[in-house]
Amino acid sequence: MHDSAALDRFLRGMEYPATRDDLLREAARDGLGSDDRAVLARLPEQSFSAAWHIRYHLARHALAEEFSPSASSALAAA
């Protein structure tokens, strides 16, 4: 999972509920790094009730990538 202190501070400081577009707009305004903004851009288009809700989606996405068939075949080839 993408773990960034800057992203963590940003999520703690956000007002909720917030949509993905709200998060991206505020991230750009706050000067959040491009890697962190790219992570937020992969979130589903919905309203998030709290920072934990966003972290939950980010963790699910990371696990899905980790255990996808393409990731498994890449590991087997290594």
Image (cartoon, grey):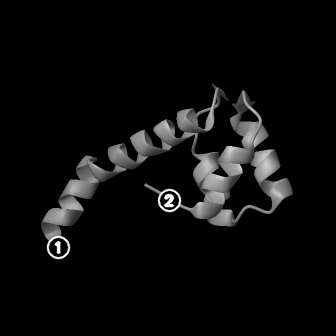
Quadrant of the rendering where the N terminus is positioned: bottom left
| Residue count near mark 1 (Cα–Cα under 10 Å), binned few <14, some 14–19, many ≥20 | few
Query: Do the numbered discs 1 and 2 sit on residues whose CB atoms are within 8 Å?
Result: no
**Outermost residue, left direction?**
76
Which label's residue is closer to the chain start, 1 or 2? Answer: 2
Q: Is 48 left, or right, of 74 in this rendering?
A: right
Q: Would you place residue 70 above or below residue 34 in this image?
A: above
Q: Answer left or right for 77 relative to 33.
A: left
Q: Is residue 72 left or right of residue 50?
A: left
- Give the residue type that dot 2 points to: Asp
Residue 56 horizontal/vertical position (percent) = 47, 37
Mark 2: give few (<14), some (14-19) or many (20+) Cα within 10 Å.
Answer: few
Q: Quadrant of the C terminus?
A: bottom left
77 in relation to 59, above or below: below
Q: Nearer the viewer, residue 19 or 69?
A: 19
Residue 66 coordinates in the image, percent (x, y): 30, 52
> Residue drawn at (48%, 58%), measured in percent from left and top?
2
Figure quadrant of residue 44: top right
Quadrant in the picture for residue 31:
bottom right
Secondary element at tag 1:
loop
Q: Which residue is mark 1?
A: 78
Q: What amino acid is labelled 1 in the image?
A: Ala
Q: Which mark is residue 3?
A: 2
Measured in 3D between alpha carbons, the distance from the residue under mark 1 to the one under mark 2, in whole angstroms, is 25 Å
* Observer-nearest of 30 and 35: 30
Residue 18 location (% of width, % of height) = 73, 32
Instruction: Give the number of callouts.
Output: 2
